Amino acid sequence: MIRICLICKKYNAKPADQLSGQLPRDRISQSPPFQIVGIDFTGAILVKDNTETHKSYVALFTCAVTRAVHLELVSDMSTKCFLLALRRFLSRRGNCKVIYSDNARTFKAAQRELAYFTNILKDSKFQNFVADNGIHWKFIVERAPWWGGFYERLVKTVKEPLRKILGKALLTFEELSTILSEVEVIVNNRPLTYVENDPGEPEPLTPAHFLELGYGDSKYPVHFIELIDSTTARESYKKRKTYQTLLLKQLWRRWKEQYLLQLKTINHFKTPNLHKNLKLNYVVLVEGNVKSKLLWELGVIKEIFIGRDNNVRSCLIKTSKGIFKKPIQLLYPLEIE
């Protein structure tokens, strides 16, 4: 009777589980800083405006490859303010190719605005290069913040020093923007690899190494026209260019051998085992906001999404309220045929 009892099946159901997924290709492929970006908001922070106070928010842009951070202060969470912050980011850091974000309404509205502007730019003969390098916006699965862990983790990294610096202070918008710029520099100088005790060892790799490549080299020519005018200078320029290319290759080699190998050793499960994959037409419980499983909704799996390792990572669920895409960790299979 217990085996055929629906209430007992709901009460005893356990969440679907799976091996930790492989790192996305965007995280392990060599690319310029801020070409692959994750975006999130943090706040709210009270800002003083004459005699009044209002809430402001910090838009955090994270490079998925170099782990660099760019911070923009916005006055509210509207689509207009976010698009202005995005324009400032693109002007300073260059045009990015891919943007990852959660399913917030602000980001969805921004995507519709960007798609509209992209269509306009495609019709313009003077701005075809902008249309060719259009932004590909990707939303993570609903209620799966760990899918955007590479930028969620840095939200905490930025919020902690802000709390310590600000305390109970009430700053103006300009003062807070200055503090954010200083925090950004500090976070971008954090070590990505181990700090060696031996003074003779090379310094640890930081995001600033990728952002400031070549800036500290005083021997690099300022005016290239001076090199083109003289034959001897032209040979010097070729040697200098070769040297710069060699430094860049060494930097990315360190990133690959030290930083990426560090990520490879991290595994969510202490004893990873292959779990049973969910299949089409499985009846599942969809985890809700209440604690009792008996109050959760029943759903049927209509589509499954498989990762690069051929394991199911998320499913399209049909419930009485509609069709939703959910990660498998929020699904409790009942094994009802």
Image (cartoon, grey):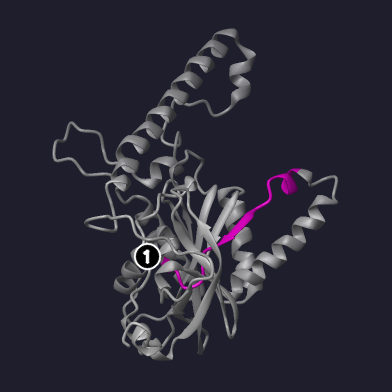
Locate residue 27, reporting x and y percent.
Answer: 45, 47
Magenta range: 129-145
Residue behind mark 1: 158
Residue 52 shows in this picture? yes
Q: On the picture, is 139 further left or further right than 285?
A: right
Instruction: Give 291 or 91, whichever is nearer the viewer.
Output: 291
Q: How many marks?
A: 1
In the image, taking residue 163 as reference, residue 60 lies left or right, namely right
Magenta region includes residue 155: no
- The correct choice, above or below, for 290 with respect to 162 in the image is below
Residue 25 percent location from the top left of the image: 48, 45
Q: Position of residue 83 (x, y in %)?
A: 64, 66
Of 223 and 247, the residue lying toward us: 247
Looking at the rendered structure, the kind of residue marked 1 is: Val
Asked whether the viewer can see residue 72, the reply is: no
Q: Secondary structure at mark 1?
A: helix
Residue 176: % across, % down? 45, 71
Residue 127 vs 47, above or below: the answer is above
Query: Residue 185: which quarter of the image?
Result: bottom left
Q: Quadrant of residue 1?
A: bottom left
Q: Which residue is found at the position 32% from the left and 74% from the top?
A: 163
Which residue is at the far left?
197
Kindly identify the residue that appears in the image at 74 percent across and 48 percent down: 131
137 sits left or right of 215 in the view: right
Kindly identify the residue that appears in the image at 43 percent across and 41 percent down. 210
Label 1 packing within 10 angstroms: few (<14), some (14-19), many (20+): many
Q: Residue furthest front?
A: 1
Quarter of the image for residue 119 reads bottom right
Residue in front for this viewpoint, 230 or 309: 309
